[in-house]
Image: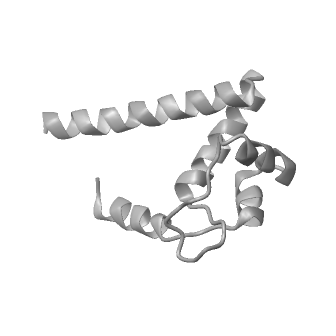
Amino acid sequence: MSAADTLIDATLDELWFDLDDLCRLGLVEACWLEERLADGLILACVDAPDSTRCYNAITLARVRRIACLERDFQAVPELAALVADLESEIQSLRRRLDLLEA
């Protein structure tokens, strides 16, 4: 990972989005997002800087991935969320494996 990648990751970690921002940047309708929030498939961040419901870049990526899976594969929301979770876990395991091999 280069210094530029680290800087970008650090900057993204500091960004906070409200519901409207998340809808706009995630390219989804508010009702779509509210349904996934109500079902517990997407969660607000607990470490938000204040007591409002906020979302971070990780949540934004999850929203985009779930929406893509639902659209491209006509997946039900629960299945799309499961696939997104599994993909995230695979990425995490690959990063750990790369560290062990280095």
Number of marks present in the image shown: 0
Question: Going by the image, does 57 lie left or right of 94?
Answer: right
Q: Position of residue 61 (x, y in %)?
A: 58, 48
The residue under the point 66% across, 25% down is 79
Q: Quadrant of residue 97?
A: top left
Q: Position of residue 93 (x, y in %)?
A: 32, 33
Q: Position of residue 91 (x, y in %)?
A: 39, 36
Q: Is residue 67 above or below residue 6?
A: above
Q: Is residue 88 above or below residue 48?
A: above
State how the image is colored. Answer: one colour
Q: Position of residue 34 (x, y in %)?
A: 79, 50
Question: Going by the image, does 77 lie left or right of 45?
Answer: right
The residue under the point 31% across, 33% down is 94
Front position in the image: 13 or 41: 41
Q: Is residue 25 above or below residue 61?
A: below
Question: Going by the image, does 98 lie left or right of 19?
Answer: left
Q: Quadrant of residue 73?
A: top right
The residue under the point 86% across, 49% down is 31
Query: Which quadrant does the C terminus fall into?
Result: top left
The residue under the point 74% across, 63% down is 19
Question: Going by the image, does 42 lie left or right of 86?
Answer: right
Q: Quadrant of residue 64?
A: top right
Front position in the image: 62 or 41: 41
